Image (cartoon, grey):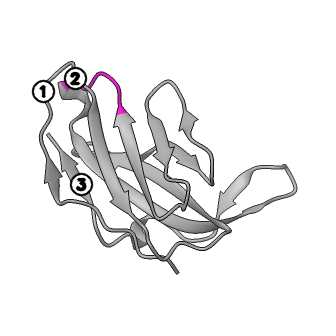
Amino acid sequence: DAKATQPTSMDCAEGRAANLPCNHSTISGNEYIYWYRQIHSQGPQYVIHGLKNNETNAMASLIITEDRKSSTLILPHATLRDTAVYYCIVRVAHWDRWGCTCAISPWWQVRRRVAFI
């Protein structure tokens, strides 16, 4: 299993882009990079995931280096509502009978986290 490491905290000016790095130098070819966030007193919330290509959704962008050894979560216009603990997780996924990408490892197995304030 790949180990993901992140800074323990980051600061960002409101309205500016927040770039949250994650190092996963031991990633294998079939492991996805997932980001979740946990806002105080709430359960974890999925943010974005990717395998090899950069990804973008309404909440964030995920930039993955060509060698896949690191990635960056970008929140384009961070606000106080984005204050949370952000989890970078590397894990194997599989396709179920509905065609969904389903994680095998639970999100709480992550050991490092980023508190974004």
**Tag of residue 114:** 3
In this view of the protein, can residue 67 be seen by the observer?
yes
- Residue 27 place in picture, x, y as percent: 53, 72
State yes or no: discs 1 and 2 in contact (Cβ < 8 Å): yes
- Residue 102 place in picture, x, y as percent: 68, 58
Magenta span of residues:
75-79
Q: CA gap, disc 1 to disc 3?
A: 16 Å
Q: Is residue 99 above or below residue 1?
A: above
- Front one among 68 and 107: 68
Closest to the camera, between mark 1 and mark 3, is 1
- Spot the residue most to the bottom: 1
Q: CA gap, disc 1 to disc 2?
A: 6 Å
Residue drawn at 63 percent across, 53 percent down:
52
Q: Is residue 82 above or below residue 85?
A: above
Q: Is residue 7 above or below residue 84?
A: below
Q: Which residue is mark 2?
A: 16
Q: Which residue is mark 1?
A: 13
